[in-house]
Image (cartoon, rainbow, N blue to C red):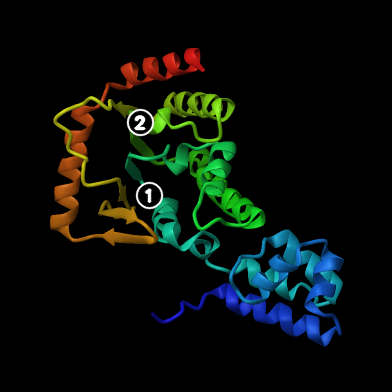
Amino acid sequence: MKKQVTSWHAVGAQIAHFRKWSGLTQTGLADRLCVSHDKMASIEQGRRPVDLALAARIDDLLETKGVLAVAVAKVPKKEKYPLIVADLVEFEEKALTILTYEQQTVPGLLQTPEYMRAVFDSSYPPVGDETAEDWVNGHMDRQRIWTREHPPWAHFIIEEAALHKPVGGPEVMRGQYLRILELGRLHGLGVQIMLTKQWPHAGLAGPMVLLENPDHDFVVFVEGHRVSTVLDSPEDVSNLHLKYGMLRSQALSPDESARLLDGLLGAS
């Protein structure tokens, strides 16, 4: 498979070029910036993003007159996230409507930072602490859509089993229950829980996210192990929209779901 080249490869190459021009080794630059040597190597190789604050510090240190900060600011937003969710993030930014069905974890747009970090910490193969922190920051940026002047209309169906999985331990889960309840009270945002004992069940084929764009067209985002797919054919969209409607009818009502979460809070 051909290796994907992103804007971060160009940014990393620029940093390496300016570093050498300044007479610094990669280790020397890492030490001056107080970052790990592994992080510096990953940045120069284009394997990890650079936040704007770090780019500005490198500009100051290497006297590059803001070139790197400008380059980082111009990186397309979708490239600032892990590839598995990059397409999803691009659609979320403009979505009028977001409909999400999730089985294994709380949906990313509802997660607390502590819950996110615990999810990334459980990744296998493991990811480094700094990479996990970058991902947490990126995922929290996604949640800014709730503070837009006109946030999207959104609905989430979460499998009950995901709420019983002790991600990060009792305190993390308690904070996560509170966060779901808080967001569930927002105008235009609904949460329903699918009981584990529910049968029949329309969602056995896996999770999905349906997104409506400003032209009122829908796409569907589905993902698995290290792969994600965006479906936009009218037949696929129609079939999965009908499936989502059936899932809504099979899940607990929003009020019943809130009471279940209150019960979990009382038991935690």
Few, some or many C-alpha atoms within 10 Å of disc 1 (few <14, some 14-19, many ≥20)?
A: many
Which amino acid is tagged 1?
A: Ala
Q: Quadrant of the N terminus?
A: bottom left
- Image-based side of 107 in relation to 129, left or right: left
Quick one: SS at disc 1? Answer: loop
Residue 242: percent from left, percent from top = 15, 42
Which amino acid is tagged 2?
A: Ala
Residue 85: percent from left, percent from top = 43, 56
Residue 231, quarter of picture? bottom left
- Image-based side of 33 in relation to 181, left or right: right
Q: Residue at x 68, y 70 (%)?
A: 70
Q: Residue at x 48, y 14 (%)?
A: 267
Q: Mark 1 points at which residue?
A: 95
Q: Which residue is drawn at 58% across and 48% down?
A: 136
Q: Is residue 173 above or below residue 67?
A: above
Q: Name the residue under label 2.
A: 161
Q: Residue at x 27, y 27 (%)?
A: 196
> Which of disc 2 and disc 1 is earlier in sequence?
1
Viewer-proximal residue, 253 or 90?
253
